[in-house]
DNA sequence: CTAAACCTTCACGTTGACGTGAAGGTCAAG
DNA sequence: CTTGACCTTCACGTCAACGTGAAGGTTTAG
């Protein structure tokens, strides 16, 4: 498949896919015309990339991790041994982020509880406008 | 207290505090010399700011939320009613982020489980080089 | 009274993951 | 054989939360 089709399948843009390649996350074949050619596997790979990016990993970290991911049969684990430390570090970073997110959500929850109570006398109407 | 002291107490930098003020998150008094003067309350406020920033809220969102937070007696809830939607939106954003983080952490966990098993036969040495 | 250690306001630099044209080659359809 | 929808490679723009001097005023300790 070509770059635009992959972008549609994976829910992203051609620009992002070129960027991933520039960062060493993807290695598409090239047609005689110079066009990039991706195999269907790439869809899952790109989804993994997006997931890890949304988890706060940068492209360098993903570049280390990605070859070890099951569905990716292309390169298959070249730097796996030393990688375990990096994996643990990222895992800890993710857990720390989740903790901070939880704490911040608690703050918002307290606001959501305290807010309406404070303005209980004033507001409390205008809600009957929406039947469903 | 002056800006550097507040920065130390809250674990940040003067530059960040000036930035928060520029974004409307802090309103310190001014001495005759032009120096900023903060009351002790500000320490908690700054900690709240950092917490919400680390949760992915931007300064604009925090500027809306901050006046409603308990310890902050300075302004006290000017736009609280319509704010509840914004709070819910941010809460949902945080929950979604936590879900993605959890999914990504699962991916890493699967790698941490599968990785050592796969390279078990090949690696396992080279670790005795570093004594300390 | 002077030097160190603060403080002030510009104002440009940084980082990461892309967005957004620009200028031009390629390919299927009419 | 020409349109139009693809594709290619530069290469600069963006956004957010600050970092980092620059140039100068203020306060405090000796």
Image (cartoon, coloured by chain):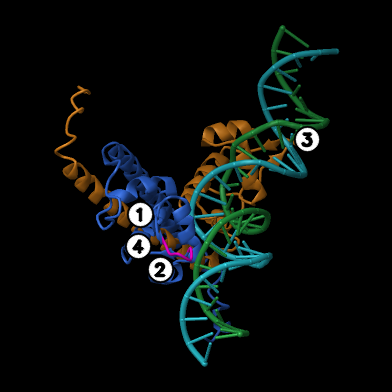
Chain colours: A orange, B blue, C green, D cyan
Q: Give the mark toward the camera: 2 or 3.
A: 2
**C-alpha separation, residue under disc 4 versus residue under disc 1:** 22 Å
**C-alpha separation, residue under disc 2 versus residue under disc 4:** 8 Å
| Dot 1: element | helix
**C-alpha separation, residue under disc 1 versus residue under disc 3:** 49 Å
**A4 vs A58, nearest the viewer:** A58
Residue at image position (41%, 56%) is B54
**Magenta extent:** B30-34
The disc numbered 4 marks a residue on which chain?
A: B
**C-alpha separation, residue under disc 2 versus residue under disc 3:** 63 Å
Q: Residue at label 4?
A: B42
Q: Give the mark toward the camera: 4 or 3.
A: 4
Q: Quadrant of residue B114?
A: bottom left
**B24 vs B61, nearest the viewer:** B24
In the rendered image, residue B38, in percent from the top left (x then y), is placed at 38, 64
Question: Would residue A1 be seen by someone viewing this image from the given angle?
Answer: no
In the figure, is residue B90 to the left or right of A67? left
| Dot 3: element | loop
For the N terminus of chain B, the image quarter is bottom left
Crowding at label 3, few (<14), some or many (≥20) Cα neighbours within 10 Å?
Answer: few
Q: Give the mark toward the camera: 1 or 2.
A: 2
**C-alpha separation, residue under disc 1 versus residue under disc 2:** 24 Å
Let me know if marks 2 and 4 both belong to one chain.
yes
Q: Residue at label 3?
A: A32
Q: Residue at label 2?
A: B6
In the rendered image, residue B93, in percent from the top left (x then y), is placed at 37, 44
Q: Residue at label 1?
A: A101
Residue at image position (41%, 54%) is B53
Let me know if marks 1 and 3 both belong to one chain.
yes
Crowding at label 2, few (<14), some or many (≥20) Cα neighbours within 10 Å?
Answer: many
Marks 2 & 4, CB-CB < 8 Å contact: yes
């Amino acid at each position: 498949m070509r770059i635009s089709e992959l972008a549609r399948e994976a829910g992203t843009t051609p620009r992002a896919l070129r960027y991933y390649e520039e960062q060493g996350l993807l290695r598409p074949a090239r047609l005689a015309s110079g066009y990039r050619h991706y195999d269907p596997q790439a869809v899952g790979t790109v989804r993994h990339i997006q997931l890890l990016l949304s988890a706060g990993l940068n492209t360098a970290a993903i570049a280390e991790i990605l070859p070890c991911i099951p569905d990716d049969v292309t390169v298959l684990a070249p730097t796996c041994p030393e990688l375990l430390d990096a994996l643990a570090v990222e895992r800890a970073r993710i857990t720390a982020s989740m903790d901070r997110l939880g704490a911040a959500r608690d703050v918002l929850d307290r606001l959501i509880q305290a807010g309406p109570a404070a303005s209980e006398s004033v507001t409390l109407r205008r809600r009957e406008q929406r039947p469903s």
